Image (spheres, coloured by chain):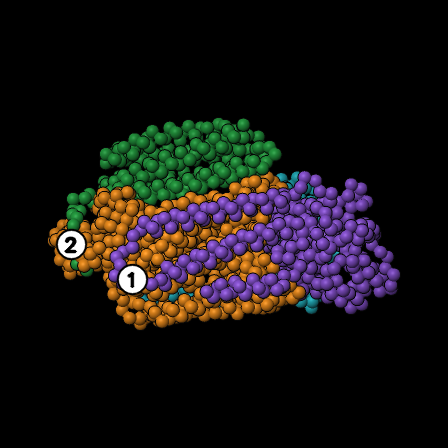
Chain colours: A green, B purple, C orange, D cyan
Amino acid sequence: MNRSVVLDLSKLPPHGLGTASLTWWGTLAFMLIEGTGFALSIVVYLYLMSLAPHWPLDAPPPDLLPGSGLTALLIVSLLPNMLIARWARQQNLAKVRIGLVIMSLLGVAPLFLRVLEFPAMHISWDQNAYGSIVWVMLGLHTTHILTDLVETLVLTCLMFSKHGDNPRRYGDVSDNAMYWNFVVATWLPMYVCLYWIPRL
Amino acid sequence: MRTALVLLLSITATAAGGSGNQSALNSQGAPAIHVEHLIIGITVVCAVVWLLVMIVLGWALLRKRSSDSGPPRDRPLTTIVSSAVAATVVIIAALTIASFYTTRSIGLPGNTALTITVRGQQWWWQVIYADANPAFSFQTANEIHIPVGQDVQIQLESADVVHSFWVPSLAGKQDLVPGRSNSLLLRAERPGTYRGQCAEFCGLQHTHMAMMVIADEPADYQRWIAAQRENSVMPTYADAAAGKAAFLSKPCAACHTVRGTSAAGTTGPDLTHIGSRQTIAAGLLETTRGSLAAWIADPQTLKPGNNMPMVPLTSVELRDISAYMESLK
Amino acid sequence: MIVRDEVEDLRDTALDEVQLDRRLSETWSTPTGLWGALSTVDHKIIGRRYIYTAFIFLALGGILALAMRLQLSEPEARFIGPDRYNQIFTMHGTNMMFLFAVPVMEAMAVYLVPLMVGTRNIAFPRLNAFSYWMYLAGGLLLWIAFAVDTGPDVGWFAYVPLSGPQYAAGKRADIWAQMITFTEVSALAVAVEIVVTVLKQRAPGMSLDRIPLFVWSMLVTSFLIILAMPAIMIASTALILDRLVGTHFFNPAEGGDVLLWQHLFWFFGHPEVYIIFLPAVGMVSTIVATFTRRPVFGYLAMVMALVTTGVLAFGLWVHHMFVAGLPRLGESFFTASSMAIAIPAGLQIFCWLATMWAGRPVFKTPFLFVIGFMVIFVIGGMTGVMVASVPFDTQVHDTYFVVAHFHYVLVGGAVFPLLGAIYYWFPKITGRMMSETLGRWTFGLIFTGFNLTFFPMHILGLQGMPRRIYTYQPEMPWSGLNMFISLSAVILAAGFLLFFIDAIRSAASGPAAPDNPWGASTLEWATSSPPLPYNFARLPVVGSLEPLSNNSETLSVAGGLSVDRRELIVTSVVEALPEARESSPGNSIWPLWSALATTVLLIWSIFTPWAVVWGSIPVSIALIGWFWPKGTPEDDT
Amino acid sequence: MFRGINKAKWPFLATFVLLVVAGAFLGWARQPRELRTDPPIAADLDHLRLMPNGISGAPPESYFAEGKLYESDAYNLSQGQRLYDWFGCPSCHRDGRGNVGPSFLDGWWLYGPEMVSIVASIRDGRPHGMPAFRDRMTIEEIWQLAGYVQTIGAYSAKVGATGRKDDRQTRPAENRAPARILFDEGPVGVHPDQGPSP
């Protein structure tokens, strides 16, 4: 078959940024998968609640302090997170490095509060279905914090290495920032569900 | 049109009989009759639609095509396809409404005179006839007697896993769900024995978990109730009497109840009137002295995995216990 | 290593065809040898592997089916005991749904979608390699467990409490639940790849209204996978937790619920049917268009029907629970929604009929399978309408009627189109033609065998024969039909055997295939058979729904891509306007290590929850190794 | 096979076939789940020889021949779990913590933790209130129950140990051993050094 060249692509950039990046779309698709998982966990929580004669089952409502503290911390972390996304777009290596260090610390900090959240539920996973679902919800979200933390730490190392100053890496940084926004955003309905619905 | 041929053949085969007493096509109770009408109705409609589609398919593929006509225009096709979709919508709507009305007609009425509790167990049916007077309450297994022409509410519970209560000739099925209580309307228009079977996979012996629903004339039913309320009969023959002694001294009594004796186990079926039941081992065998002996001698060969252990017995003990069981009318 | 020329950033416009092919081959080829095979990320090689593996599982599942038919051929037969039989029917269902039907459809997409949208590799090719290894590991886990008598025996639907901690002894149910995790991970990974490939890697000019129907169907399917599979992930995780660490999700005594499992399972399980069926719709549309020599009638209507089916698929799950004791009013709603899905299905059937009527049919083997599909699938659709009715369903639920119904839908609706698709795309995949004579025989045997095997099951179900029983008593009136079915199954098996013989023989020594043997009009036929590692020497530019039909002598292509790195084009979602040249990752062994590490974690976690903690360390290491830049042109430019 | 399977792909196919063959071999070599024990073997299970003080001894031949089935096999352990409830063990031993009867969790086995001792305790009874189940259970059931009882207080969970029951939660299940440290066992009674004095 003969081929006739009708389109010249030589002037296109060698790497897509933002919505022209495949990774961006991939991250979005994974967020859709995980978001569905989070939504279903909330549905299971509400379903079990609808069957129970009283809620929470055989436990007082959870203590507000650790969970609310974690929520506040996560919301605060959005600010440096948005900044780092902006710096990544500007391809500013120095600022991105600082931002990644900050975000690594802000990724570790919630884990300390999260450790306190489990006892604040006043129930263990094997006592009843209420205990099971709250532990699984907390566990599910903790996995996401951990995943993003590991990714942030790896990116931090990467940005301090010779591979750092590269549009592709900046794209990774901004995708990682988007993912952290997702981790925070999914926590908010879970926070309401875990801490406030038992007080209704 | 091989399929059409098969369809025809099988419809004739079905019409010619071959339905038996456990068949949705041999309905003998109001709920099942309503559903059978619906089944026939929907099947006829669907068969006609399928035939039409097949005729169109055949015509579309094999029609004569003029050799030089240009590409056919799409406009008439659009009209035809749209009308076909519209027809689909109408048929679907009609079937949905028919289904809805049938659903209403098989639902439980507000009050039924008789309620029987059925508890599913791996792999047998515990049947409880509760009465306000505890002395009149009794239980049996794998056999349900109901009066003809009367609405009966079956209360469905499970002791272990999910089972499903299904007596196709009398009504559709309903699951027995642990932690929940379901109910089902059962009604027989004619006296007879209707076989039913567990319809939800429940483990090793899901296969052999049948029960008999016996519809009696009201007088027979009352006689049966009265007999069931009685304690077990005293054995009159020597072998049965010896069997009773063996039964009570062996592990049998640890799991089974025979009212009127010291046997009060609750793990296995109540055997107070086992001799009067049509089948043993949840519909596995007809109740005869021989089948009882075979069952007691080696339950794991007849129904592998069931919870009745193989109790070592001498041949004399085996003969006596079978005789005793048979005597428990 | 790539031998660099003196010219920096060499573009394809500077090269003639021979030089271009040589340079692209250097950049895109998979090295020979074991290491190359283990580290390849070529979507065609991985897609082929996926297809072979899925067909091996089909054959194994078929052998199980024959074993069951042997046992059921006569009453109280004792060929297979209840324990083994329960494992066999569980394995048959699990294997066919999770290891054959879904993966084979995805495998076809992995192979075909990049070619049909005119790109050089699938998006995230390393994830693609990873997904295959996960799939293979999950399949091996299940089958090896079965071989050592630890195969799951709780049904492919694994209803609690039968599959729960108290009633399912040993690791059998855990194996099932964890096998689910393997196949879900691989299915979700492929779904993400397909979505991104279709949305962002289409050839310039392939706007949304020029996407081939098969690609549309895979896009909708991928979204179904993304939205449905998390439900079974949650369910199987909850089951494992109940079994291993004593949570109470399904324990009614402590506030759990048995029906919660059923809701979660069927919220996944019903879309699962469409995950299997929608790709088949795409295959049928493709084959119909080619063999009636005209585009499918009602392109827009077909796309809308696909999307509608996808949306409705999430509103039907309760019709699997009509006899579980839910409120009747709610059930009536699900009757209506379940019946409503017949409307888009009907629309598709009518569009194909219109296409056949208006076109000029050529009765080659792929088209025969499509005709068989029409005959059988419409019956399956009709019985689907029947079981959607609550009262009707109370009589046929969990009987052989339902067995007949879903085999009509899944075999008629998916396997027939799939076999047609294999005959259709075989020349593209292998470069050789399959035998037309054997193809006709195959079709005849499978069509006859299928109907003779499964049609009588409708009758058996109405006559009261429940599913999942390992035998039945002689006094039941079922023995005649069962013997008839078992004998017919031999015809069906012979058909499949012939298919395998034909496929293997043709792959070895069939006549060489031209680039476009059927005169088809989609892009995969614009490249050689089998395609070169880079798919297209110059990426095509699309100006219509049928890029090959208008002027079949010349193909419009784009120029200006680099040949020094694996490069393809990213285009916009709606119009497919070029946005960037993008590199596509090169071969890597890390996906294999990651899959092995994940496999260790998942299998270990059947035995102790601590596996999740310690097992995640090697997984993290492997993933870091995967993503850490290696200084290749793909990573750094 | 297919053109795709050239030299490079043979290792795949070979590995796959090898795994399937290996699996089939393992399946053939391993005994399937036994639902019916042959009467001679069941009878032999009764032939355990105890030490004169009733503590420990030699299990019957068939016990070893069957690969210590009742100690490790998940199916038999789960049957034991059912029997524990069906034969009223909880009325004295509760969920294993003990009440009228001794606890199974404190690591103190009055007659030793061996299967023979436990089987003998169940079959023949023991002083101070443990009844004999010889006439209420078959010997096979006794072995199944003994396997489960041994699991209740195990320091490390058996691979085939039972999970939680679909019932009220009172303590962590047997597959989460060591049971001892998972909950308070309450005050421990005074134990004699070896067996109860007659």
Q: Position of residue C57 (x, y in %)?
A: 44, 62
Q: Which residue is at 84% across, 62% downward? A: B240
Q: How would you rate the neighbour count of disc 1 (Cα within 10 Å): few for under 14, some for 14-19, many for 20 or more?
A: few
Q: In the image, what residue type sits under mark 2?
A: Ser
The vertical placement of B323 against C4, above or below, is below
Q: In the image, what residue type sits under mark 1?
A: Ser
Q: Could you say which quadrant of the image residue D143 lies in?
A: bottom right
> Pointer 2 and pointer 1: residues touching (CB < 8 Å)?
no
C177 to the left or right of B133: left
Q: Which residue is at 50% across, 33% downward? A: A194
The residue labelled by disc 2 is A4
Q: Nearer the viewer, residue C246 or C524?
A: C524
The vertical placement of C97 against A56, above or below, is below
Chain identifier of the residue bearing label 1 in the image: B
Residue B115 visible? The answer is: yes
Q: Position of residue C415 (x, y in %)?
A: 42, 60
Q: Position of residue B159 (x, y in %)?
A: 66, 48
Mark 2 or 1, which is nearer the eye?
1
The residue labelled by disc 1 is B66
For numbered disc 1, what is the local secondary structure? loop
Q: Position of residue A74 (x, y in %)?
A: 40, 31
D144 to the left or right of B263: left
